[in-house]
Amino acid sequence: MRREAWRGGWPVLVAALAASFPAPSLAEEATRLDPIVVTATRIEQKVSEQASAVSVVTREEIEGKSPVVAGDVLQGIPGVDVQRSGSAGNRENIKIRGGLGTQTLVLIDGFPVNSPTLGEFDVSSLPVDGFDRIEIVRGTQSALYGSNAMTGVVNFLPRKGEMGRQYGVGASGGSHNTLTWKGFGQGAGGKGNLYLGANGFESDGIVENDDTSLASFLGSGEVETGGWGRLHAIVLTTDQEKGIPVDFGTPHDRNHELTRRGFLAGARWEMFASEAITVTASGSVFDEFFHDRDPADPGEVFPFEYDDTTKTRKTILGLQARFVAGRRSTTFLGLEYQKDRGTDTLFSNFGDTVLASSTYNRSVYLQEELRVGEGTGVSLGARLDGNSEAGTQFNPKVAIFQEIPGTGARVRAAAGRGFRVPTLSEKSDPFIGNPSLSPEVAISWEAGADAVIFHGKGRISATWFYQDFRDLIQFDGTVPGPVGFGELRNVGKAFSRGVEAEADAELLPEVSLLLTYTYTDTWDAANQRRILGVPEHRGMLSLLMHPSPRWEGRIDWRVESDQLDVPPNGGDIRRPGYARVDLFTRYRWEVAGGDFREVSLVGKVQNLFDRTYEERKGFPSPGFTFLLGAEVKI
């Protein structure tokens, strides 16, 4: 019998607040409360200098959660929803402010990685130990980044080599025969730095055919070029083998398997023409390979057997000039060329198909960052995209912030237009594809306020948002389509509106508290219901503890209300709400002399009270799980 997860949450909260274990010491309080970001405007600025709603997951937060993949550290961010289809390694995409995963642009080191065929980026195969921070900018960002940035942008920024040399290894194990391992080497000198890291993850999962094997490599570095420039480069590879235990029409699939490989190579060369002018040339290639195979299960009456191989490549070239006119004005002018290519070879008992398609995009963008007075900032941007399949798109944006003198508070507002070009699959799918599809469009508005509280030891933030979605690509069964039973068409209209709130405060020198909450009201006009997969209420309460310089811990209480969903095997489309409690701890000590610099013991417990729940309808989530391990730095 299902146990309602909402019950029992308040006693946990009371116990956590009463506990004598306290949260992390805040030696670098100013940086923690006001970190530097680059994604919102393409230049390094503090969060307090941004007119858009921005969140940052820091290196300390990543280490504190001992994550397996990216989704483990993105939970609880205001306006952001990351839902996993079962256990770790299963499908997981990022949704912002009621939008779809295809409407969130994902960057790795500033290079786009959304799939040309799926339109989204599945973060279930992305380990995050090699990343220094994750920046999330909410609201339409197509004026700066183009397609897919309809509801926001998420940027994974890699670690950099630190001065001197350092090496490290780590391993952990736990529930469901889970094993993780990692190793890294890094260093820096007068002319540059280098970071190299590798990660692995294996688990049997929680049901039959739910096993996962994942390995990745990340290399990142930069070097000065002749005293007048700087070259930065990144290489990332991922290799995943995954069983698929739940299928559409098959609640317990015993032999469905997926192989996924990814390769990203990117470089960025900054040339300092003068103190006022910087020119940046960049290029990247992102390849993905999918091999999806599903033989007939024993006893299946009407099996759909198939062997599907998909290969995609995204190639991007860019040139950008930055002009700085004193402290009040920074102007960007950029050109970008992108080509997406994909092939799909399908063999099945219903016939075979071989598809190949490509599209290219040329764009020019202009961005102006103005500081028109003390504590006043204005951001003006516009981008023109010309797509070989979707025509011309013009996307403007304006944002402004104003500090309130003497209060430690500020107000901000933004408005803009975003779009998404139809994917190669949406246009060329042999069953429901439509080559005449137009881009999806979103118009967004937001207004918010931020304030520093408790004499600089805390902060509060709130943002109201409204997004109007137009020309959404949805299945229309009223028209014949390629094979006579419907096709994809631009028939969808929807809106999402709501409030994001966040509070962060140091309660004691060893204790801090973090509270995030998102209210999202959505409506899908075409289907006369809420947008699928979006809970109305979502929040997280975190108690951060630092009882001693060596020991730190964290308690997360995560709550979601119900949502409407698409069950893979029919039935009630309502997914009940749930609450979950997770624990994280790390004990570290420095070693004087010898070969080791630092040794750490790490542990985490997820779903402490063994709640029965689902993040996505029809995909059971793990019960009580634990992971224990050790890390050594040399």
Image (spheres, rainbow, N blue to C red):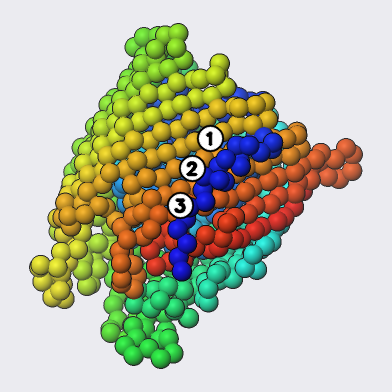
Question: What whole-number distance in Å separates the C-alpha atoms at marks 2 and 3?
Answer: 13 Å
Which is more foreground, mark 2 or mark 3? 3
Image-based side of 412 in relation to 124, left or right: left
Tell me the residue at 49%/58% (across/down).
124
Quadrant for the C terminus in the image: top right
The first of marks 2 and 3 along the sequence is 3
442 and 483: which is toward the camera = 442
Instruction: Identify the element where label 2 is drawn.
Output: strand
Q: Are marks 2 and 1 in contact (CB under 8 Å)?
A: yes
Q: Is residue 168 left or right of residue 214?
A: right
Q: Nearer the viewer, mark 3 or mark 1?
A: 3
Mark 2, residue position: 540
Note whether 46 is above or below 489 in the view shown.
above
**Distance of mark 2 from mark 1, alpha carbons?**
8 Å
Name the kind of residue labelled 2 in the image. Met
Numbered mark located on residue 514 in the image: 1
Q: Is residue 430 visible?
A: yes
Circle 1: element type: strand
Q: Which residue is mark 3?
A: 6
Q: Nearer the viewer, residue 153 or 430?
A: 153
Name the residue type under label 1: Leu
Q: Considering only order in the chain, which callout, 1 or 3, is on the residue closer to the N terminus?
A: 3
Name the foreground residue: 383 vs 13.
13
x, y (%) of residue 51?
36, 25
Q: In which quadrant of the rendered view does residue 213 lie? A: bottom right
Query: CA separation, marks 3 and 1?
Result: 20 Å
- Which structural element holds mark 3? loop
